[in-house]
Amino acid sequence: MANRRWLLPEAIEDVLPCDASRIEALRRNLIDEFTRHGYEFVIPPMLEYVESLLPGSGHDLDLRTFKLVDQLSGRSMGVRADITPQVARIDAHLLNREGVTRLCYCGSVLHTLPAGFNATREPLQIGAEIYGHAGLEADIEAIRLLAAALGQCSIEASRFDLGHVAVFRALTRQAGLAPEAEEELFGALQGKDVPTVRELVAGVSDPVRSALLALPELFGDRRVLERAARVLPATAKIGTALSDLRRLADALGDLPLSFDLADLRGYHYHSGVVFAAYCAGNAGTVALGGRYDDFGRVYGRARSATGFSMDLRELARLSPRSAARGAIAAPWPEDDALALRDGDSALCPEGTVSTRTWSVNAEVIRLRAQGERVVLALPGHEGTWREAGCDRILVRSGDNWIIESLKED
């Protein structure tokens, strides 16, 4: 029988050097971008007790979460499928601040099933959250930060979809739908399955029935909001939701905005404005976000909150590839007595090295200080430096060290 120990589970994969370096570069750029905007970095644990990971955030997150029994306490634990609840817990229970708190994070999450045909079950989730401000200013900041983050990845958003879960909630309350019927209607609207929507609302009286039937058609540019005001019931909650979307349209008019009142992703999770980013040539979203006020209540402290998250693996796939500069292969020093430690780098002279007594180690230290990747060529492996990522080689020429192109085939 063939040895299959190297096989990984379905939809789980290694990230090899080329892609790993791109992902790490994006991670650093994004965390730095968030930090420049005042967001503090946190690192939640991979495992938590299930009741902490699933604080009433919906059946879908429960199904996506791997569960196990803690050998120490005997309690059920889960491997996080989403970092956002953990960050909300940190804000509500650990930091316990009175004012606005901005937090960012990055880490692997694990899903029981892939989200799509080619999706991984181990996304690398990165995101930013704002706590403690109930006004639309926080939503505007979050969407603008998302646009800046995509710019850091050299990804141009083709559109930012905006919606508001309060519209659907207000209509289902007016319709008096049972929880099971509401869940079915939610699924049908997500798929824009108009025949199923019509069937599910057959017993609902007008004008609510007509409004629910209109939701799948209420998508497009800003004119959708005026159309929605004409066809939806003029209730306080719906009026406030449409007013919020108009304010966002005014504040974010320089971005490619669209509106979709049937986009209910995260319906069980969010409480107000929701948004998603798309880019050309990619069928799915590149980022999801929205408002989730009072989420921290289960951790002992309700806080207004909004934010977004992205998958770094997906961002790396979509961002343009630039030609990476290769490393320099440096000869192994023949006289170890001449070796310098990194701490001796201050001894390196500026400019060209022009003394025979200057060791290869000193030149390696100098090159690394300039940002070059330098690989010491271990003896006996000639002909393999290119597969190690080298495209140049450090050689001695008279009194100088010079860098030449690697001649390996």
Image: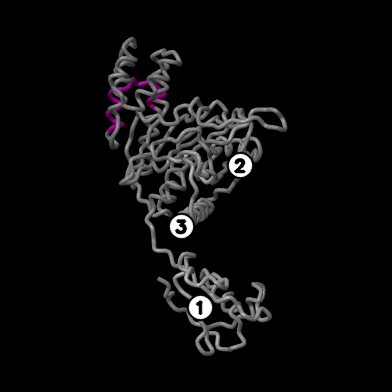
| First in sequence: mark 2 vs mark 1 | 2
Residue named by callout 3: 18
Q: Residue at x 53, y 27 (%)?
A: 62
Region in magenta: 224-239
Q: Residue at x 44, y 15 (%)?
A: 180
- Secondary structure of the residue carrying numbered label 1: strand
| Whether residue 73 is situated above or below residue 378 in the rendered picture | above
- Residue type at mark 2? Pro
Mark closer to the observer (3, 2):
3
- Would residue 231 be counted in the magenta stretch? yes
- Residue type at mark 3? Cys
| First in sequence: mark 3 vs mark 1 | 3
**Separation (CA) of disc 3 from disc 1:** 23 Å
Residue named by callout 1: 394
- Would residue 234 be counted in the magenta stretch? yes
Question: Can the viewer see residue 125 in this picture?
Answer: no
